[in-house]
Amino acid sequence: MKNFTSFFLIIIIVSFGYAQSPADLNPPYPRIAMDYFDNPIHSWSNGTKINMLAGFDMAIIPGMFDTKVDVLVPILRAQDPDQILLGMGANGVNIYSPAEYFLVTSYRAVLLEDLAPGDELIKVSTTEGLPDDAIHIRINTDVIAILYVHSDTTLVTTPSGEYGINEHHAKGDTVFRVIRVLGQGYRPNFGEFCPFVDGDQVWDFLAKKNIINEMKWDYRLLDGIFHDYFRVIFPSENADFDFDMNGVDDRIEHGTDWIDAQWKHGMDLWIQAEVDLMNQMAPDLPNLLSVNTGSSLHQYYDIVNGHCFEGYQRFTTWSYIHNDVMNWMTLGVQPQVIFFLDYFAENHFWNGKNRFNKVRFGLSHAMITECYYGFTGGDTYQYWYWYDEYETNMGYPTSNVQTLNGEPYLLLRYFDNGCVICNGTGSNQVVSSSQLQGGPYYRLKGGQDPSWNTGELVDEPIELYGYNYGNHNLRGDGILLFKQPTTAVCDIIVDNFFMNATSPGSDAVRLDGPWQKKSAAGFKDFTQNNPFWALSGSTWKISIPNYDVDGANGVFDENYGYHAVNPGSDIYTATYYPTIGVPGWYEVSEWHGWHGDYPQTVSEATNVPFEIGVSDTIKIRGAINQQIDYGQWNRLGYVELPVGKQGYVRISTKGANGTVIADAMRFHYMGDDVIPDSTPPKSPTNVRVY
């Protein structure tokens, strides 16, 4: 059973060139993946974010040495040697790339005056064809951001900095306009007319930059590379392109088919160059290549190991996704690493992570079509969550994909340990047990959605929800059925904020008193980061129009890492109520980091009182020393909990001798017939000390 909550930060010394053990490229289903798009080095501590990646079969992480991939990967390998790690590489040119590689428009002008580094005014022969703002130009090898067009012959730039004038330019030099897209960088000239710089064209340059210079493939850290914003079809946000560099708009001169062919020319050479370099530098490693197109990818069955459906149905329809992955199953390079990155948008922060049928819908579809799956929150996928179904082991497929009820999108597939059904029809569907071979089958017994995951024998028809809300918004449900009774209860985490690391189905901590929201500084050395329990330690928050969330007038769920309070004359409390779906015995543990940026800069309390109770009955009392045992689960005791929210843990400031931290509590299911041994061991006798 997967366990993503035993997170002790293990630091090992990296010896570059070590023999990496191969990751498990064929894990059993379900296969769970997650991206880690955020740079791990920022102004805020990562908290336990890196540690939380341990439960996933595949993780997409920053792949550049300037983001400390050489530090991050050994930590992840120590947590799970079988995890597939894909490093995210650069997929375009930037301000530090040779300017000759930038795609330009048909705009041409000449300088009317010499320029020196730091100049602000650029005199040109014409500004015709330039917009009023969002302009980037190239003069020789200088790429310059233009603040605004001052007149028919004058452009204004910043007086200094990387986007200003940094070279000397002579009167008569040519001025080009380069194509810059917000969020995606500069467009490279992938056409056959791309200039050579030091013997390389842009596709060679990008491949060497990623594989040799940035990811240092001979260090043998990663299993493969991942490219975000992978645009197979030429992106046409801009209206003017000049691949052949002759000053004529290619749309007028050649047409869109020619433009698309030019773009594909360089894309093909680029990805082939990356695969070749990986295989040359580390021929015994998996050397996987995956990309994010946002939609289907039928052009590269023979070279790419898969791709990401960003947002699952965000950019394309469910049927389009299904047809694409069915083709990949038979035509694609193995091993396949197609990833359903499912999500809910900000306007569903208030309940998105608790839409269990949405998770089952995407997960069942991924399992049936041999894909990886992950469920995130937010338009930029800043949160991710763990579900009961993730904890199961369905083994491997034992049949082809089948359909039921004459519906091409009511899908069924058999596995070693059961079967999986997914309803992609867009309407409610009923499946009877008599339609399933190899039974009997049992529902999963789970705690997050116990009305669905009842654990019962399937002897009555199963009704699967379905509704079609239109393009890119097909709703449905799925179900995992098992040959043997199966229980999977995720560790229940009650944290400081509803979105930020509190488990699906449960609510955040309840605070009474002047508790303050806290974060901590982030450091390049991950061991220095405050290990509070959080997915994000920033102060970011989201505004949700037309919602009044928790009385916050639409401002939802700030991302601080923990709460803290100093003892006063009054008693302040923090109470953690887990939502229990499966009754039984639970191990209860507390987690805290230190208070502030560094350990021992503030005197945390050594005697924080706690009590564990059920309804009005206190079962266990004790005290927590928050000056020790940072960044780990500290067991408080065992308690038998009923269904619902009757159980709780409460900490308080009563008699506390320092700052009290309220961070996270974990409730780990042990079973319904467990009687924990709470008797302390006897003192040793007949001991002789030498």
Image (cartoon, rainbow, N blue to C red):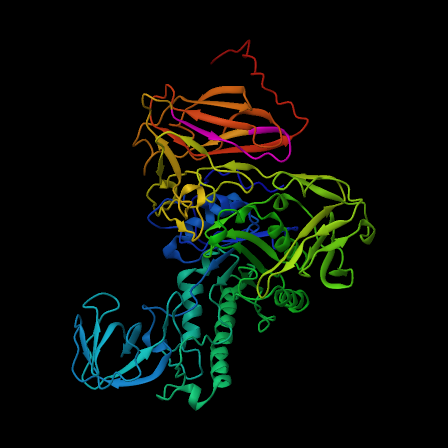
Front residue of 166 and 357: 357
Instruction: Name the residue located 37 percent from the left edge and 49 percent from the top edge.
Output: 540
Q: Is residue 23 visible?
A: no
Q: Is residue 12 shown above or below 662?
A: below
Q: Position of residue 286 (x, y in %)?
A: 56, 59
Instruction: Name the residue located 54 percent from the left edge and 29 percent from the top edge.
Output: 588
The tally of labels here is 0
Q: Write down the region rendered in magenta.
A: 572-587
Q: Is residue 516 visible?
A: yes
Instruction: Name the residue located 50 percent from the left edge and 61 percent from the top edge.
Output: 225
In this view, the residue farthest toward the top is: 686
Q: Would residue 344 be found to the left or right of residue 394 on screen?
A: left
Q: Position of residue 480 (x, y in %)?
A: 70, 48
Q: Would residue 526 be found to the left or right of residue 436 on screen?
A: left
Q: Position of residue 92 (x, y in %)?
A: 41, 69
User: Which corner quadrant of the image does residue 330 belong to?
Assistant: bottom right
Q: Would residue 248 be found to the left or right of residue 149 on screen?
A: right
